[in-house]
């Protein structure tokens, strides 16, 4: 398909096939488009400080949600973790399989059916934004509560520079083909903590950067 995140998958395939100059054009309503080098999705897993910290906090059986090209999954697998990579893009999943990730699922998290519970749900690159709305984030947290192990956790990062949830209308373009516009959610810390508490999670903010980018760990707790 040539809409939504399939454009992203096509860009990953182009880069992995040797097009080192591949770049996505990101359109955000109300702003000028900007280029995003596809190489960033093939960076070392611990390149960014937030990612490096997040990887040290993973435990047990890990589900890497919105895994993309699989950089974090590869890192965790190489360090002995039982890791499953999940992405909605079939192209991205093919790349991850080719890169040697043992367990890859081409599915939307909301449609996932898993044989056993995970100890960690990992969402880096602000991929939690793909839920699109606060109501869908609530549904996501309820799903996490149900499908994580008794001591399970969600590790995610987002950006807080408005002290309130912000939904942006975003589309991706690659090689002249523009995908459908999708909603992307930036969830502020206060709202995340409130939603998480209502779903039975304790929230710990483990890193906040100057631009508002932050890393959160949501751990199961008694209501």
Image (cartoon, rainbow, N blue to C red):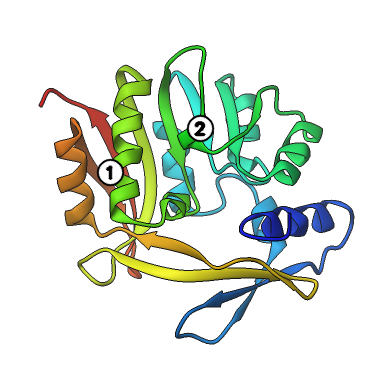
Residue bearing the label numbered 2? 111
Which element is circle 2 on? helix
Q: Is residue 11 above or below residue 127?
A: below
Q: Is residue 121 above or below residue 188?
A: above
Q: Residue 9 at x, y = what percent?
A: 71, 53
Q: Nearer the viewer, mark 2 or mark 1?
A: 2
The quadrant the C terminus occupies is top left
Q: How many marks?
A: 2
The quadrant the N terminus occupies is bottom right
212 on left or right of 50? left
- Decide which of tag 2 and tag 1 comes sooner along the chain: 2
Q: Residue 164 at x, y = what percent?
A: 21, 66
Q: Residue furthest right?
A: 18
**Which residue is drawn at the image coordinates 28% and 43% (left, top)?**
138
Q: Is residue 146 above or below residue 197?
A: above
Residue bearing the label numbered 1? 138
104 on left or right of 202? right
Which element is circle 1 on? helix
User: Could you say which quadrant of the image residue 144 lies in?
Assistant: top left
Out of 165 and 17, give the one closest to the viewer.
165
Q: Is disc 1 surrounded by few (<14), some (14 to 19) or many (20+) residues within 10 Å?
A: some
Q: Residue furthest left?
A: 223
Q: Is disc 2 surrounded by few (<14), some (14 to 19) or many (20+) residues within 10 Å?
A: few
**Which residue is drawn at the image coordinates 23% and 50% (left, top)?**
192
**Which residue is drawn at the image coordinates 55% and 44% (left, top)?**
66
92 on left or right of 141? right
* Cα–Cα gap, marks 2 and 1: 16 Å
User: Could you say which quadrant of the image residue 23 lies in?
Assistant: bottom right
């Amino acid at each position: 398909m040539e809409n939504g995140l399939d454009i992203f998958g096509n860009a990953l395939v182009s880069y992995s096939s040797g097009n080192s100059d591949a770049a996505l054009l990101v359109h955000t309503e109300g702003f000028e488009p900007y280029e995003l080098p596809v190489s960033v999705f093939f960076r070392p897993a611990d390149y960014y400080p937030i990612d490096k910290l997040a990887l040290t906090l993973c435990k047990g059986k890990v589900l890497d949600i919105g895994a993309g090209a699989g950089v974090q999954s590869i890192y965790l697998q190489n360090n002995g973790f039982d890791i499953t990579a999940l992405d909605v893009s079939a192209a991205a999943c093919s790349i991850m399989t080719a890169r040697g990730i043992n367990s890859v699922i081409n599915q939307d998290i909301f449609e996932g059916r898993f044989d056993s519970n995970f100890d960690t749900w990992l969402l880096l690159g602000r991929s939690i934004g793909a839920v699109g709305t606060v109501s869908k984030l609530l549904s996501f947290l309820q799903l996490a509560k149900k499908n994580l192990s008794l001591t399970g956790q969600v590790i995610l990062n987002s950006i807080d520079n408005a002290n309130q949830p912000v939904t942006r209308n975003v589309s991706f373009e690659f090689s002249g083909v523009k995908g459908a516009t999708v909603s992307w959610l930036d969830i502020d810390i206060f709202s995340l903590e409130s939603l998480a508490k209502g779903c039975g999670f304790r929230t710990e903010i483990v890193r906040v950067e100057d631009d508002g980018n932050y890393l959160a760990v949501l751990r199961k707790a008694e209501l």
